Amino acid sequence: MATMRRSIAAVIAGTLLTAATACAQTGGGGNGGAADGNYPNKPIELIVGFNAGGSTDTGARLMAKALEKKLDATITVVNKPAANSQVAYTYLSRAKPDGYTMAAVTFPSAIITVLDESRGANYERDSFVPAALQVVDPTAVAVSPDSDYEKPKDLVNAAKKNPGTIQATTTGVASNEHFALAQLEEETGAKISPVHFADGATDATAAFLGGNADVLLGNVSDMQQLVDSGKAKVIGVMESERSPFLPEVPTFTESGYDVEMSSSRGYAFPAGTPDEVVDKVSTAMGQIIKEPEFQQKMKDAGLAPKYMNADEYASYWDETSAQFESLLPLVKEEK
Amino acid sequence: MESFSFLIDGFATALSPQNLLFALVGCLLGTILGLLPGIGSTAGMAILIPLTLSMDPAGAIIMLAAIFYGGAYGGTITSVLLNIPGEGESAITCLDGYQMTLRGRAGVALTTAGVGSFLGGTVATIALVFAAQPLSELGLQIGPPEFFSLILIGLALLVGLVGRSVLMGLISACLGLLIAMVGIDPVMGEPRFTFGLPHFFDGVSYVPVLVGLFGLGELLATTGGSAPRPAAPRLRDMLPSRVDARRSAPAVARGTAIGGVIGLIPGVSSAISSLLAYSTERKLSRHRSELGTGAVEGVAAPETANNSHSNASFIPLFTLGIPASPAIAVLMGAFLQNGLTPGPTLFTEEPDLVWAVIASLFIGNLLLLILNVPLVGLWTRILAIPYSVLRAVIFAFVIIGSFAVANSVADIYVMIFFGILGFVFRQVGIPLAPLVLTLILGPFLEGALRESLQISQGSFAIFIDRPLSLAFLILAGVILLGSVLSSSFKRKAGLPADAEV
């Protein structure tokens, strides 16, 4: 009975919370200087540029809950879903750099919105101060279970033999899957045609399962259940290390192809945010991500935990940005 | 009948007082969340998931699932009573639902929607129990080319929606398609018609558009005093008469079938099911000439279809592990966070839980019925609020709802713009239905066309080579030809053309 009463209380609290979150607006502004050592002393707004319930949102809400305890602060997650997070990044770049506004940052969105001039983004890499990285989800390559392809080499050789006839799903133009194909072509000369499913992984997976595309490209964390149910065979992961989700699957690197592609998720503040604030949040996030219990929660939600501190994340951002910039002409020309 | 005995066990779990309470709370929460446009059940579920982690998995999932289908019903209430579509899927219900309200038949409309939803949802759940595996294979047969041809059927049915003036109907339909073109081109990756505003890169979200056209447009029109105002129904007008029941029955049956089949296709919004169901009524119903003027079929068909769709979309989740809609994706997140991976293995690994959830779908549908039919009286009391007060509340409501879609002020401007447009439409007699249809179908049509052409490497033959796609194309052609011929016949015979929406 006690658990039941607690559950009911949770439900009622939830109702109130839902209402509160729904109405939550851009609080912020005002005073509350961050650099005076008593940060945080008012609610922190965490902007998520994707819909509530998506994987970025799921990770951010897990983090927000843990961070609230760690920092003894109130963190409000605000979803501003539009334009592959561009609206959220614009909002962040214009926010007061006092440590009370931060945003979930995802790659490739944070990079591609800057690189692609047609999007007219009015922020750049330097508009943000990275705080910490939480998730790295490598791109994996799956084929139908009865396919002849067993390892990356089989696919690459087949694609070289008949350039452009093998078709692979992506989750849209300039998605990490699209960049993965460009990188594969640049590295090996194997040309695989993309089929863009701009509405995302669900449509791509359904089309693949219905036999409308030969190869399914997607985040490795999403592949696990397809493998478990025998609907797909993953032949390679585009990373230097094997994935904890599918440890038996070889990487492209170990197969001799220098192809590394992933989507990743972390957090950033607007440029000009005091260093001690960024450090404090970054350190707290590092402690959280290293807790085994938190790691388990993330894995249950299909998120591959990987922590980088502010400096590591900053250089990772620069490297990834350079990598994408060099591949951009290929992606643009391919369409 | 192995599944049957599993189902009985499932009922035993789902009927425990605690789980029953969770289902009830979920239904109520969903209904309330559904009332406010912009905050749908999807967002509600996403926000509540962290709280459910302390509950046991069956209870958590039962409650979240109840929020999911409760939300659809909440949207219906505002569509019928206030002409504000709470969700895309109940937008088309505004057409006849609000007309019924104006005639004092709000109670009948809500009760019909409730009963229809119950029947549609229950039939879809029965299909889930007995034929999940073959049905999910059927869903996968609908690839991009088949889907494109299927949507063409929807567009062909549009002819039935244009009303008295074909010109006015086409203006409305083209405008809908134009709005649907806004956003980043799905293949070239370049922004189109966005005025350089990132807010529109994903397209104009249709909730503010619909809320503006219907809700604010109506508000502006009634302010002038020219339009009729809704009346609170008398108590004896609450329940559908025998005539209503007889007229609704075929509409409910067709709605169930349409929603049930479309719901199997992964990635398709339930708004499409309700649109197709409504358009089909315009074509097939014996009282089709009355649709748009407050015919009970116009409420029964789409409301049944969207609930049938919602329940059918559990089939791809349970059998393939693919979330068929954003709301189901959130529900899938709840499964994952409770350490359960949806998919065929779930039936063998966690049969107790799966069957408890399936049993709760039956119970939830029933609860929604028991909960909402008596509440119809309460909801319709909203209309007894003096109109001067109600109007102010509605105004606040449409603004908050539009803002809540993406926590963005830009959507409020969108809503106001389309509110003014909706007012103009009413003044010059342009029907709203074609715009709703093309606005919602447009992005799916474009996406499917371009995905198909990428698959076929640019050859249009893909639409004819695939048997299912060809069948859909022929059906679309027959519908189109049929409407053209019958309308020219009508004109010759001097019969009155269809009433205007």
Image (cartoon, rainbow, N blue to C red):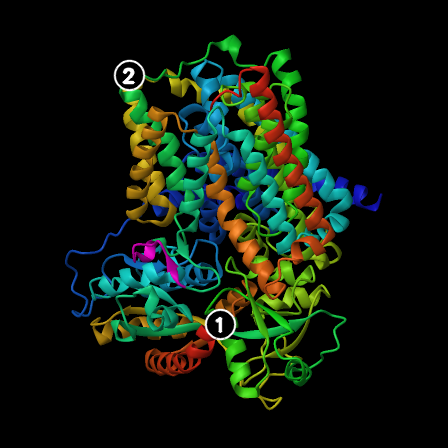
- Residue B68 position within the rendered picture, expressed as x and y whole percent measured from the top left: 54, 42
| Mark seen at residue B225 | 2
Relative to A271, say whether B463 is above or below. above
Query: Badge 2 local density, few (<14 within 10 Å), some, or many (20+)?
Result: few
Residue closest to the far front: B492
Q: Label 1 is placed on what type of residue?
A: Asn
Q: Label 2 is placed on what type of residue?
A: Gly
Identified at 38% across, 71% down, the residue is: A112
Q: Secondary structure at mark 1?
A: helix
* Residues at circles 1 and 2 in contact by the CB criterion of under 8 Å: no
Instruction: Characterize the magenta stretch by its predominant secondary structure.
Output: loop
Q: Secondary structure at mark 2?
A: loop
- Residue B246 position within the rendered picture, expressed as x and y whole percent measured from the top left: 66, 16
- Residue A111 position within the rendered picture, expressed as x and y whole percent measured from the top left: 37, 73
Image quadrant assignment for residue A100: bottom left
Number of on-image labels: 2
Give how far apart the Cα atoms at labels 1 and 2 are.
56 Å
Asked whether B470 falls inside the magenta stretch, the response is no
| Mark seen at residue A176 | 1
Identified at 75% across, 77% down, the residue is: A148
Q: Which residues are magenta?
A: B190-199
Image quadrant assignment for residue A328: bottom left
Of the two numbered discs 1 and 2 in the rendering, the one whose residue sits closer to the viewer: 2
Identified at 30% across, 54% down, the residue is: B195
